[in-house]
Image (cartoon, coloured by chain):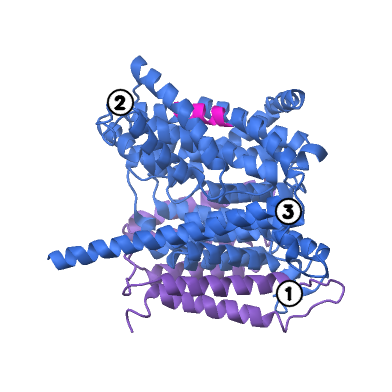
Chain colours: A purple, B blue
Amino acid sequence: LKNLLNRERVQALVTFAFGVILWAYTYVMPTSKMDPVGPTAMPRFLGIVIALVSVVQFLISKGPYEAPKKEKHFEHLAFLVVSVAIYLFLFEVIGFIIDTFVFLIVFVLYFNRAPFKEKIKGAVLFSAGFTAFLFIAFRVCLKILLPTLFITI
Amino acid sequence: MVELFMSAMANMVSLKAILFITAGVIWGIVGGAIPGISASIAMSLMLPFTYGMDPLLALPMLASVYVGAEYGGSIPAILIEAPGTGAAAACMSDGHALQQRGEGGKALFVSLYSGVIGGLVSVVLLVFIAIPLAKFAVRFGPAEYFLLGLCGLSMVGTIAADSPCKGLISGAFGLLLSCVGMDQFTSVKRFTFGIPHIDEGLDMIPVLVGVFAMGSIYYQIFTNEVFDVKSAKFVMSWPSRKEMKSITWISFIAGIWGTFVGALPGAGANIASWSAYAQAKNLCKNTEDFGKGDVRAIAAPESSNNAVPAGALIPLLGLGIPGSNSTAILMCGFTIAGIACGPLLFEQRPEVPYTMMAAMLVAQIVMGAVGMFVINPLAKLTSAPKHYLTPAIIMFGLLGSFATCNQTYACWIVFACGFLGLVMKWFKFIPSATALGFVLGDLVELNMRRAMQLSSFGGISIFFEGTINKVLIVVLIASIALPIISTKRAETAKRKEAEAAESGN
């Protein structure tokens, strides 16, 4: 079973299922009598293409499962994802300046491996400087309406 | 033709145009020089800034980013043995060998000099090929365009991927993403799932920034690449007169080669630079120093690599089909400016294609002028800690996308598409094929439906009528089948070798 269902074949099964679901979904999608070809033609065509190519992928894949060689760091990725999500949630609540400053400082502190006392100064300077640069570039020069809370320029 | 080109040149040598082109070239060199930021990422980060700009300045600036990035990639390859772009890897062994011998400055000069020659050669070829191609392509109807779009997409997908099938699925997924939102023929909503923001479809910029820039950052952090930092210092030195003579003719030939490879959909800078390296090794005499610091081994791939941007403009301007992810982003720039690429552009707005050609020429000259001055600061930038560079790129991507519609929703699209890019990279799908499919989606669907409407109420017989269609179908089948067969053969050969080695043990 390990040889039959290698990594490539499992992926091919997933994409095949996706193609079939897409193809089936086009029969319940809203359509229009105005156009004889209809808005479902392209998704249906793509569903068929994805399913057929997945079948070819399944058939030509052979060999045992090979694990990817690169080391994975789920904790770093989770940190990044959560911090970006929080940044976006708070973007219009606390305004661009505070939100960006805090995001940058937290990011630099987390990913810089130096001792805290060494990295805090660089993190604060970088975060303040880069936030100011972004504010000037986007708000002042490009006139983008960034949410700035109480600061009005 | 000559009058239009000279008029475009006159516009491009104005102070304002030169400033925009210089900004584009420098941004491209910076983007190319930072490992992990490719030409397409640098261009996608620049794309939001082109909103509302004069198209005859915005498009040359974007094209200049492409030109600059192809050169910029060689700087970290030579200095710190970390290629900024995939194509720059071809000059890495010889360039870094020279750097280790204290001749890094010479390697960088050769890279710039040959890059500029390759770029200039390619612009001349662009002028002479794109126009006849556009005249021929005026005969194309919707069926031909549909097949041509599929050919471009399948070539990019199958050549770029380790597994051609994954490349095709990636491209098809990109086409599917372009279907999201209100159908342009009937206004029926597709795949919106009740989310009001996406009724008008997914914006190009957040999707491209997400798939390329954010996806790369997620992937680099996921695989721990964010902490790899190397320092770079170099001493300036110059090639001898004999070396200059030998690299000049190599650069001319490699420039011609790079233009043709760049014009082929899917081939791109990687194939151009590696194949030029291999050919230089075959054609030159006394190649025993190739790989150990031979300047000819830097000149050939760098010239070919820098000829690719102008070469890639040939199908974009002549046919309206982008042949690579970078030209797909350039096509987005055209769309943002409200300009449709393709052969009719030469009739309806001839100033645009000629401006692009003139801009490519000026960008090469600007790159030659500023290329050496930016090396020192770039040497420092390439060795800057990634924990500063990475959040800076994240902020540019998020705010650049926010700027397109002044809504946080665009940032969420970047966030989500970043995941898509990460998953695709991790499972070895091709984000660039998805991006190309997304950009080509409207063109492919529009022409497919128009052709089917013309063909007796929804039939597909129209796709098999006429010589051009038949040729395109053969090309399409070959572009899908040949890579699958060759990959299969390579895998079988590898398996047999492994089995033979095991039985020998």
Nearer mark to the viewer, of 1 and 2? 2
Q: Quadrant of residue B155?
A: bottom right
Which residue sits at x=54%, y=56%? B478
Disc assigned to residue A40: 1
- What segment carries the magenta color? B113-122
Q: CA distance from mark 3 to mark 2?
A: 49 Å
Q: Residue at x 66, y 55 (%)?
A: B470
Asked if residue B131 shows in the view, the reply is yes
Q: Position of residue A28 (x, y in %)?
A: 72, 84
Q: Earlier in the sequence, mark 3 or mark 2?
A: 2
Q: Position of residue B475 (x, y in %)?
A: 58, 53
Residue B455 lies in what quarter of the image?
bottom right
Q: Name the amino acid, label 3.
A: Gly
Q: Residue furthest top?
A: B241
Count of labels in the image: 3
Circle 3 residue: B466
Foreground: B83 or B120? B120
The residue that disc 2 covers is B285
* Badge nearest the viewer, 3 or 2: 3
What numbered label is drawn on residue A116? none
Query: Is residue B220 visible to us here?
Result: no
